[in-house]
Image: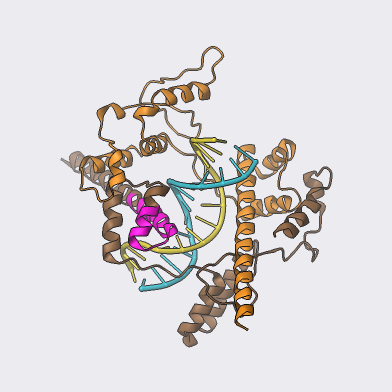
Chain colours: A brown, B orange, C yellow, D cyan
Amino acid sequence: MAESTVSCIRQVDARPVFTIDRILGLDLNRPELRNISVNLYRPWAESEPPQQRRHTINGGHDLKTKIKEDEFKYKQHFSESYRRTLNWYIGRRPRTAFSSSQIELLESVFLVNSYPGIDIREELAQRLLLDEDRIQIWFQNRRAKLKRSHRESQFLMVKKTIANLKDFEEE
Amino acid sequence: MAESTVSCIRQVDARPVFTIDRILGLDLNRPELRNISVNLYRPWAESEPPQQRRHTINGGHDLKTKIKEDEFKYKQHFSESYRRTLNWYIGRRPRTAFSSSQIELLESVFLVNSYPGIDIREELAQRLLLDEDRIQIWFQNRRAKLKRSHRESQFLMVKKTIANLKDFEEE
DNA sequence: TTCTAATCTAATGAC
DNA sequence: GTCATTAGATTAGT
């Protein structure tokens, strides 16, 4: 179980009272405090990775930067398999391509209810042969898109109004 | 902000064809569901809402209690999604973007104590020039993140074990 | 390039 | 407090 991880933290936790100063005084660079790693759950990664499947908790930034550098370095030799490995390394789910019929159903549901509960999402997932997770993400992104379009139209309205005011002044 | 809410509702007004039967339960078009005003305390909202305050603090009731009561009263007329829309109309707190140095301190404190008491939270708030509220929320979300990663790694372990068992059987 | 699936996390409300 | 879910901001694939 995660018992070991938990107890590790509890151990540290168990110390009596901390002031910020004391915490700041701690040498966080000590090896036992660094490289606290976390196994990420990547269900779409089918086989065992060639490398260790570990990301440091807040190492995402450095990791990404490093990967970007490598990407630039090897850009001309960028093969599909290398990209796949990179993708796995970063740990991103492969992009799902919805079919037009799937989109059609999702859009028609969105028109009526842009916040489907778990029951509706599950039903949709079953009908469309997708994970419920994909459905949820789709609705999240769809709502963001709607909101964006509203913002943009509002902006246009304001711009128009201002333009009209200017015309009025010039008359 | 009001613009998006209004057009959200207008969309429903258009009454498109329903594809999933369960959605039919929602009828946001009923007039009695509209124009329900509940003014909440949103100190970060720049201007006062145009309506009168319907809830005032009086007697032994605090604002939250009173709002809860009214919410219960109207619950039968209140669809979940309408309530949500209403809340967003009233306004969320703008998302706080922590600086990397703020995150750094927060993380270093989290490493040794993931449940800081009010005294430490206040001290952190003072140092980081943030509200104590933000600190508390940050720790809540950080704990949730840690827990999630634990769950995920456990799941992965189970998957691995099962895979190993299969390999063993096939030998 | 644009559009959008995916990710991360601050904020919220239910319990 | 946890937990699920949201919005907002971003990253990255087609």
Q: Quadrant of residue B131?
A: top right
> Which quarter of the rendering shows the N terminus of chain B?
top left
Q: In this rendering, is residue A72 above or below B36? A: below
Image quadrant assignment for residue B31: top left
Which residue is drawn at the image coordinates 28% and 54% (left, top)?
A: A107
> Looking at this rendering, what residue extends furthest in the right direction?
A16
Q: Is residue A17 left or right of residue A3?
A: right
Residue A71 rendering spot, x and y as whole percentages: 52, 79
Q: Does B129 appear above or below A138?
A: above
Q: Is residue A103 magenta?
A: no
Q: Residue furthest top?
A: B59
Q: Residue at x 34, y 26 (%)?
A: B36
Compare residues B124 and B160 and report the one nearer the observer.
B160
> Residue drawn at (71%, 36%), measured in percent from left and top?
B118
Magenta residues span A122-146
Direction left: furthest residue: A171
Question: Is A133 in the magenta?
Answer: yes
Q: Residue furthest bottom?
A: A77
Residue at 49% x, 28% y is B41
- On the image, the x and y values in percent for residue B46 come to 45, 33
Q: Quadrant location of the C terminus of chain B?
A: bottom right
The kind of secondary structure the magenta stretch mainly shows is: helix
| Residue B111 to residue A37: above or below | above
Give the image location of residue B110, x and y in percent. 71, 50
State the count of labels.
Answer: 0
When asked about the image quadrant of residue A1, the answer is bottom right
Residue situated in front as seen by the camera: B95 or A108: A108
Horizontal placement of B86 versus A104: left or right?
Answer: right
Where residue A95 appears, as percent x and y from the top left, is: 42, 68
